[in-house]
Image: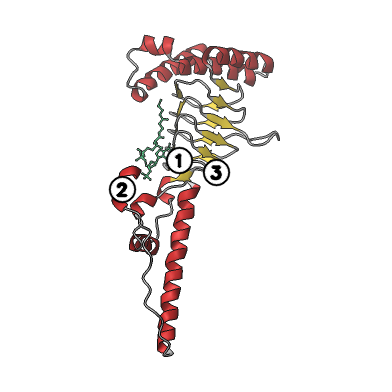
Amino acid sequence: MGNAFMLRHLREDIHSVFGRDPAARSFWEVLTCYPGIHALLLHRLAHRLWRWRLFWPGRFVAAIARWLTGIEIHPGAVIGRRFFIDHGMGVVIGETAIVGDDVTLYHGVTLGGTSWEGGKRHPTLGDRVTVGAGAKLLGPIAVGAGARIGSNAVVTRDVPENATAVGIPARILDERPPIKKEAREHAESIGFSAYAVGNGDDPWTLALHSLLDHAAKTDQRLALLREQLAAAGIKTPEAETPNTGFDPEYLSKIVD
Ligand SMILES: CC(C)(COP(=O)(O)OP(=O)(O)OC[C@H]1O[C@@H](n2cnc3c(N)ncnc32)[C@H](O)[C@@H]1OP(=O)(O)O)[C@@H](O)C(=O)NCCC(=O)NCCS
């Protein structure tokens, strides 16, 4: 990579910031005040040294970048064009990470490993991926082009192209388990607001969904049993399903 080439890269890196940060005002401001740009500039140098097998100088340049910016990019990491790290502090990018073109990371993002074995152990990010603040992407996973990772997500599996992954562990937004119709109707029949149990990936919500599902099935089985007893001439007392006493309006107020 010649110097003119590196300068052209720098120019397009800086220009790409304007499309991704409305707060950026001028070329000069981005060049002097954006730690993501400083870290990227130093990484391009460190990576060049690394490829020349100048391992210690490469590591040393990366260490200087970290002192200055709080962004730690291993010199072995392969970074594409127009890479933008906004705010930057606390970003860690591991040795075997590969980052495509037009990728955006926010502060606190880790592209890390999960094993102490050598070899490919860090994530590969496709073009145009955005990773929200604080997200951790762990292991040699692939994040498809155009995917978005929510802030604070922990991602340990591949993410398809253009998908949005959120939560811990990360789930793909469109793949959330919907509340089953029977469970929702049952919840409503006992005065429990289905709105309050919403969709979600937290363990309490998932546990609640499966309990409601189970309760709905138990009611169905009881109804069937009563039908069969009635058919055999055995009468059973009419028993109303007890109401939980939840006020759906109150719940919807505190959940929204
Ligand atoms: C993940 C993200 C890209 C999704 O944006 P979006 O497509 O507009 O999604 P929405 O805001 O419509 O949210 C869709 C659902 O995902 C949930 N969600 C969104 N972001 C989430 C996150 N980071 N963690 C957990 N759940 C999240 C929402 O609560 C909503 O759930 P619901 O459907 O059950 O109500 C965005 O929320 C995000 O995290 N961006 C990162 C921004 C960032 O880090 N900025 C730092 C600036 S300094």
Q: Quadrant of the N terminus?
A: top right
> Quick check: 96 above or below 254?
above
User: Residue at the location (49% across, 42% down)?
Assistant: 170
Q: What x and y, as percent, mark residue 20?
A: 36, 25
Q: Mark 2 is on which residue type?
A: Tyr
- The residue identified by callout 3 is 157
In this figure, which residue is indicated by the disc labeled 1? 166
Q: Is residue 223 left or right of residue 71?
A: left
Q: CA distance from mark 1 to mark 3?
A: 12 Å
The residue drawn where x is 54% and y is 17% is 70
Residue 250 at least partly seen: yes
Q: CA distance from mark 2 to mark 3?
A: 38 Å
Residue annotated with mark 2 = 250
Relative to 119, say whether 211 is above or below: below
Residue type at the position of mark 3: Arg
Instruction: Please tell me whether residue 90 is drawn above or below residue 127 in the rendered image.
Output: above
Quadrant in which residue 121 is drawn:
top right
- Residue at x 35%, y 20% (from the top left corner): 18
